[in-house]
Image: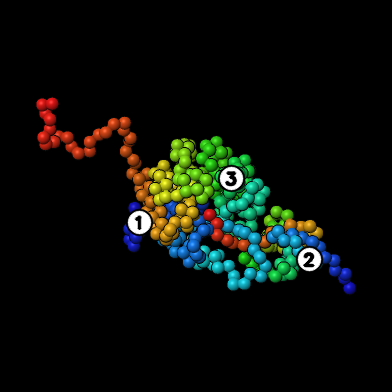
Amino acid sequence: MKDYTMIKVSVNGELKELNEDLNIKEMIVELGYKKEGFAVAVNTTFIAIKTYEDTIIKEGDTIDILAPVQGG
Amino acid sequence: MKMNEELGMRNEEWKIGGKTLSSRLLIGSALYPSPANMEDAIKTSGSQIVTVALRRQAAGEGGGNQFWDIIKSMGIEVLPNTAGSHSAKEAITTAQMAREVFGTNWVKLEVIGDQYNLQPDPFETVKAAEILIKEGFEVFPYTTDDLVVAKRLADVGCKILMPWGSPIGSGRGLMNPSNLTAIRKQFPDLQLIVDAGIGKPSDATQAMELGYDGVLLNSAIALAQDPVKMANAFRYAIDAGRLGYESGTMQEREFASPSTPTVGTPFWHQFA
């Protein structure tokens, strides 16, 4: 049985604890986001939807999840 | 020229960013009293391009995204901005995220260099523009009215330039019309939009009279006492300015010149 280790990351500026070795797709589910309507950046680098499963979240990562808002 | 029969407005087509449009007003979606008021104002303005943005979203937000649902239902072009970016890197990442979320390669490139007057950072803007164009974006760069910066943006491949009228949200109108005119003269083939600082409909008219292809504004409509009525005012103002430009304004003169014929003037002081 795998011994789960927690990692600390920043999600939209808030400190969160996540299971290690999660990819972006799994992280989105774990954080309670819906399936679409937002885009993700890790450490200020854009992560395209098609690469979610290939991108593993690591300790100390800074994650931004952005959605449409009003703008000028 | 075709006329919009319902409103009696011009409906002449023009092209920007690969799209054919009739309205020359680009409108922002922020600061309205309510989402319904925003929708009414945008519709009344006749604008076919609306600016939008991306911001952090909390998890599990129920009820969906009302704002985005309204914009999508309007069937107009969206122009995502990179507002809040302070470096080329931030702007590029925001643009890439926007392309995925909004499904457009258009981006209003905005890299702020000074927090006090929200003046764009020309160095980072040019750097970001060059990279984004290589990545296939149609870049609408928000810039100052500096001719050399405009030149650098054109050099890296920008087909559209958006010099400011005055600082964002200031409502001060066109601070430096002669600089805007210089950019127009230097770049007759680029699409030029005055972006930011418009306060009154006459400011938009003035921009159009200078030969600009369009005007982008937000606060002037959204912060009016009656945004929907003001949206209508801007619609007329932009058409008036464009018609004025196309008509060719008269030459200014140093001295007065009577418009009523002098021949046959009664009571003429013929013996004076």
Q: Which residue is mark 1?
A: B9
The amino acid sitting under disc 3 is Tyr
The quadrant holding residue B185 is top left
Across and down, in percent, residue B26 comes to 47, 54
The amino acid sitting under disc 1 is Met
- Residue found at x 52% / y 37%: B147
Residue B270 lies left or right of residue B21; in this view the side is: left
- Mark 1 or 2: the one toward you: 2
10 Å crowding of disc 1: few (<14), some (14-19), many (20+): some
The answer to whether the residue labelled 3 contacts the one labelled 2, judged by CB atoms less than 8 Å apart, is no
Q: Chain of mark 2?
A: A
Q: Which residue is mark 2?
A: A18
Residues indicated by labels 1 and 3 sit on the same polypeptide chain: yes
- Is residue B241 or residue A50 the one in the foreground? B241
- Residue found at x 59% / y 52%: B83
- Mark 3 or 2: the one toward you: 3
Q: Secondary structure at mark 2?
A: strand
- Residue found at x 55% / y 57%: A71
N-terminal of the two: label 1 or label 3? 1
Residue B195 lies left or right of residue A7; in this view the side is: left
> Is residue B250 visible from the viewing direction of this image?
yes
Across and down, in percent, residue B106 comes to 56, 54
Q: Secondary structure at mark 3?
A: loop
Q: Quadrant of the C terminus of chain B?
A: top left
10 Å crowding of disc 3: few (<14), some (14-19), many (20+): few
Q: Would you place residue B115 above or below residue A64 in this image? A: above
> Is residue B100 visible from the viewing direction of this image?
no
Q: Which residue is mark 3?
A: B116
Residues under labels 3 and 2: Cα distance? 39 Å
Q: How are the residues colored?
A: rainbow
Q: Would you place residue B205 above or below residue B254 in this image? A: below
